């Protein structure tokens, strides 16, 4: 039974600082979740997920994993954000599966929340998956992806980001094969939306600010030292 829990603790919670609970308590919470989650009303299922917020345990992760398969994207968003507050090992397994789910690929809101959860664990999906997603993602997902890439700490990440430092410039504008003006307008808008995140992630990785792709390539030739996460945090504070 839920004797160990107050009724007040089972209200809608903030996604912050969940407390580790015993297996017995977690099992009781899981039973309550399963009962509430049977509802056909997405708002009720969303509420069941919200009420998991104060608690931390592998059984809570199992509840959130179930919610990551919900038909309603808002429920999946809620579940993903809460996975960012659970123990890393079980939570990242669920997030990895969710990141590869084609249904989530169609929902920018869900993808952003999954990436934010990865970031909360100071981890990132694999680079090849991130590159593939970046090419076809919304600008909101692209920006969050760039932020999350600071946890793939390698020169490969720096090289990838270098490709997106310079503002896109129309080329061969008179050629018949040149994309329409709307294409370039969209490219420039996306670049502007993501530029500050690109700059900050490069600072987090290298400790340097760069004004151009050429500068980044110059750095790659002269230095390949990637900062530690802690050093990157300090470098960002100094901006």
Image: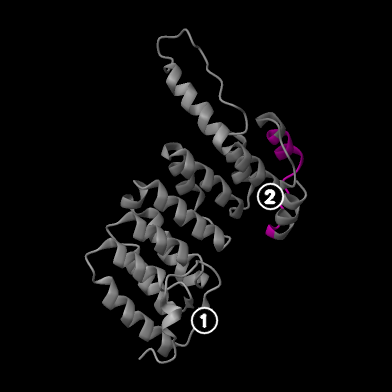
Q: Residue at x 70, y 57 (%)?
A: 228
Residue farthest toward the left in the current orientation of the protein: 40
Q: Residues within 10 Å of mark 1 (few under 14, many from 20)?
A: some
Q: Residue at x 49, y 54 (%)?
A: 115
Q: Secondary structure at mark 1?
A: strand
Check if mark 2's residue and mark 1's residue have beta carbons within 8 Å: no
Q: In this orientation, does residue 30 appear? A: yes
Q: Secondary structure at mark 2?
A: helix
Nearer the N terminus, badge 2 or badge 1? 1
Identify whether 22 is placed above or below 199: below
Query: Quarter holding the N terminus?
Result: bottom left
The picture places residue 192, in percent across and down from the top left corner, at 57, 32
Q: Which residue is mark 1?
A: 20
The picture places residue 17, in percent across and down from the top left corner, at 56, 72
In terms of depth relative to the viewer, which is nearer, 216 or 74? 74
* Quadrant position of residue 231: bottom right
Q: Residue at x 55, y 58 (%)?
A: 119
* Quadrant position of residue 68: bottom left
- What numbered label is drawn on residue 187? none
Q: Which residues are magenta?
A: 216-229
Horizontal arrangement in the rendering, residue 18 relative to residue 209 (left or right): left
Q: Residues within 10 Å of mark 2 (few under 14, many from 20)?
A: many
Q: Which residue is mark 2?
A: 204
């Amino acid at each position: 039974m839920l004797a160990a829990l107050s009724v007040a603790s089972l209200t809608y919670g903030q996604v912050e600082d969940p407390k580790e609970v015993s297996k017995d308590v977690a099992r009781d919470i899981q039973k309550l979740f399963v009962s509430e989650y049977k509802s056909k009303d997405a708002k009720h299922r969303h509420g069941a997920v919200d009420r998991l917020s104060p608690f931390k345990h592998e059984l809570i992760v199992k509840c959130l994993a179930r919610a990551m398969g919900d038909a309603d994207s808002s429920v999946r968003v809620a579940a993903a954000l809460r996975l960012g507050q659970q123990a890393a090992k079980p939570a990242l397994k669920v997030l990895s599966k969710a990141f590869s789910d084609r249904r989530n690929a169609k929902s920018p809101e869900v993808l952003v929340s999954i990436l934010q959860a990865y970031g909360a664990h100071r981890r990132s999906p694999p680079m090849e998956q991130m590159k593939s997603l970046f090419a076809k993602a919304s600008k909101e997902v692209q920006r969050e992806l760039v932020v999350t890439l600071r946890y793939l700490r390698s020169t490969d990440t720096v090289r990838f980001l270098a490709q997106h430092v310079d503002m896109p410039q129309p080329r061969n504008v008179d050629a018949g094969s040149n994309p329409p003006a709307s294409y370039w307008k969209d490219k420039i808008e996306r670049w502007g939306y993501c530029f500050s995140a690109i700059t900050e992630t490069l600072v987090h990785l290298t400790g340097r600010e760069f004004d151009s792709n050429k500068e980044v390539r110059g750095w790659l030739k002269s230095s390949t030292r990637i900062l530690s996460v802690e050093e990157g945090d300090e470098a960002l504070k100094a901006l």
